[in-house]
Image: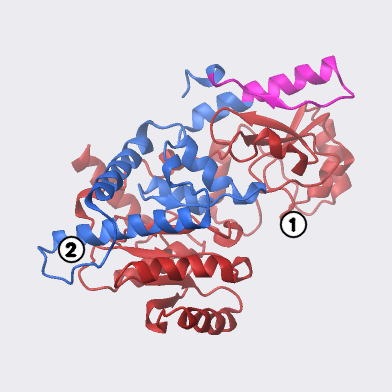
Chain colours: A red, B blue
Amino acid sequence: MTAGDTDEERARWLQECDSTHQMWGQDDAAIAAYINGLKLLVLIDLIGRIPHNHHAVLGYRPAPIQVLAIYAATTASPFIDYFVTDRVASSPELSHLFTESLIVMPISHFVNNQRALAPVPLNSRHSRRSVAAAAFNAFYKMDPERARVWWRVLNAVSNSSIMFVKYLYWKTAQSSIVSHAEEHNISRSRIEFVDKLPSFHLHLQVYFVYMHAVVVFIFMPSTEIRSFFLQICSPFGAACERVRRIPGLRQVSVVSIKTFLFLLSAAAGTTR
Amino acid sequence: MTGGLDVLYSGVPAVTLPGEDFSSRVLSSMLVFHGAAATVARTASDYERLAEVLLCSSMHERYLAFNRSIQKPACRSPPRQMAAVQRLLSHLDKQRDSGTLFNTQAWVTCAEVAMHMAVDLRSFAPKRLQHIVVARGVCANAA
């Protein structure tokens, strides 16, 4: 947890952990000594080299077995013993890309708690009436080769458009993307740049900054989407907010967490 | 990565072209273990075709839903592909409740087995780390 977490987030963490330890304000060596005193057999790092994670704590070897899970790449840290993955995300042939030994899970390595967070299915399959394509990649991850694929898709599908989120340096990116698109017979009117939502309005808990460069989401905006987190800027929310303004689409809504919980309970009473 | 997860949890298809590095294969992993490997592209042209089929199918469905009162989409996607997309959407809906991708307990069970194996391996061969492969059976009950 960090000082920036909301009371709600903190309460959820506390509820789901057997015990927690207050480490704020201590340096890496002190934290390592404290962990060592707990006499753990296995220490799992859930964030890796993300800034302010205190990854260096593990450099002191506070536990005999140190594991990395969820983080999106090898740490190249000699003090991390194992990397949790699965046979698709890193097949045995790709093990040379890791400094860690691999723990290969029989199911997807990507642990999540979606069912508990949103227990009522967001089901509106029968009401699909529209379509949008969106590329939520950070601009530095895009390249002309990927973009040409997108333009070919747009050219093949009439009346389609593509959305980008206004990440850092979006104006420069917009200029480059639009001119590149026009070279491939895509008019600028088919390219949307959408704002991020205010921090208290969002749809799905999403940090897209680590999104893979060649992922394109093909999603149907009439799919019912409800927000369930506070204070996370969501490109998803931005896209949905934009889509919401399209005439004929009323399924997508931005709601506060209070309203969301009310909708969940209402839906639970009517759909199940 | 969590974006891909949210997309799938919403029952929405996603297309990806995996690379070599881990970060470029996460969505592939989710799709394969979600029973939706059909939308993992092998090449850029395959990726292009998949995206086009999904978009066209949806647009054509919209055209029919509006009782043909809107402009007919000029798509090359034949009807049989639309049926395949419908099956995919139906599958994604079912997987949300019954698949392993969103089964937290199954993941935890597998991870606990893996950690026990790591501890055992260390006691047998403390100087030499080896890869650990968890068999599907050990967490099958939870899954």
Q: Secondary structure at mark 1?
A: loop
- What chain is tagged by disc 1? A
- What chain is tagged by disc 2? B
The magenta region covers B112-136
Asked where in the image residue A140 lies, by quadrant, the reply is: bottom right
User: How far from the left and from the top, in percent, is residue A42?
Assistant: 75, 29
The amino acid marked with disc number 2 is Tyr
Whether residue A201 can be seen here: no
Asked where in the image residue A116 lies, by quadrant, the reply is: top left
Is there one chain holding both mark 1 and mark 2?
no
Q: Residue at x 59, y 83 (%)?
A: A172
Q: Residue at x 61, y 57 (%)?
A: A210
Which residue position holds label 2? B63
- Identify which residue, B8 or A87, lies in the foreground: A87
**Disc 1 vs disc 2: which is toward the camera?**
2
Which residue position holds label 1? A52
- Quarter that holds the C terminus of chain A: top left
- State yes or no: residue B100 in magenta: no
Q: Label 1 neighbourhood size at 10 Å, few (<14), some (14-19), many (20+)?
A: few
Q: Residue at x 52, y 80 (%)?
A: A180
Q: Is residue B40 above or below residue A256?
A: above
Q: What distance separates the C-alpha of mark 1 from that of mark 2?
A: 50 Å
- Identify which residue, A76 or A256, lies in the foreground: A76
